Amino acid sequence: MPTITLNDETVDLPAEATVADAVTHTTGRELHDDGRPTDGRRLGVAVALDGAVVPRSTWATTAVEDGQTLEVVTAVQGG
């Protein structure tokens, strides 16, 4: 079970967790293997793993390992 830093909080994820699992943990929404939400609505998030952007198409295949830092950021309107 990897323990990671997810948006500045320590989180334990299931064994063999992926970036998609972390996004589901953060958003509470299930995802298809291509990163699209199963509910059909827009997700509006981006992910960085140890400071590198992870393309949505690879979320389901990018493993999360113990000690890594993951940032899940939400797009907001305005400025």
Image (cartoon, helix red, strand yellow):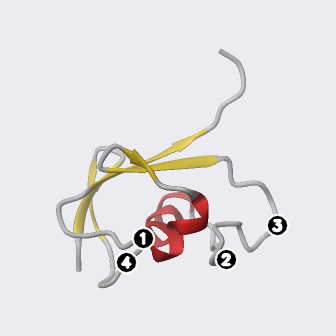
Above or below residue 30? Residue 48 is above
Above or below residue 22? Residue 51 is above
What is the quadrant of the N terminus in the image? bottom left
Q: Residues within 10 Å of mark 2 (few under 14, many from 20)?
A: some
Is 38 left or right of 52, judged from the image as shown?
A: right
Which tag, 1 or 2, sits closer to the chain's start?
Answer: 2
Which residue is label 2 attached to?
Answer: 32
Q: Residue furthest top?
A: 79
Is 43 left or right of 5, judged from the image as shown?
A: right
- Residue 63, picture quadrant: bottom left
The amino acid on which the numbered mark 3 sits, given as a three-letter code, is Gly
Q: CA distance from mark 1 to mark 3?
A: 22 Å
Confirm or deny contact between disc 1 and disc 2 (CB under 8 A).
no
The amino acid on which the numbered mark 2 sits, given as a three-letter code, is His
Which residue is label 4 attached to?
Answer: 17
The spot of residue 70 in percent (x, y) is 35, 53
Q: Which mark is residue 40?
A: 3
Who's the residue at 66% across and 72% down the image?
34
Closer to viewer: mark 1 or mark 2: 1
Q: CA distance from mark 4 to mark 3?
A: 23 Å
The amino acid on which the numbered mark 4 sits, given as a three-letter code, is Ala
What is the quadrant of the C terminus in the image? top right
Which tag, 2 or 3, sits closer to the chain's start?
Answer: 2
Q: Residues within 10 Å of mark 1 (few under 14, many from 20)?
A: some
Is 43 left or right of 25, judged from the image as shown?
A: right
Which tag, 4 or 1, sits closer to the chain's start?
Answer: 4
The spot of residue 60 in percent (x, y) is 52, 75
Which tag, 1 or 3, sits closer to the chain's start?
Answer: 3
Q: Which mark is residue 62?
A: 1
Q: Residues within 10 Å of mark 4 (few under 14, many from 20)?
A: some
Q: Residues within 10 Å of mark 3 (few under 14, many from 20)?
A: few
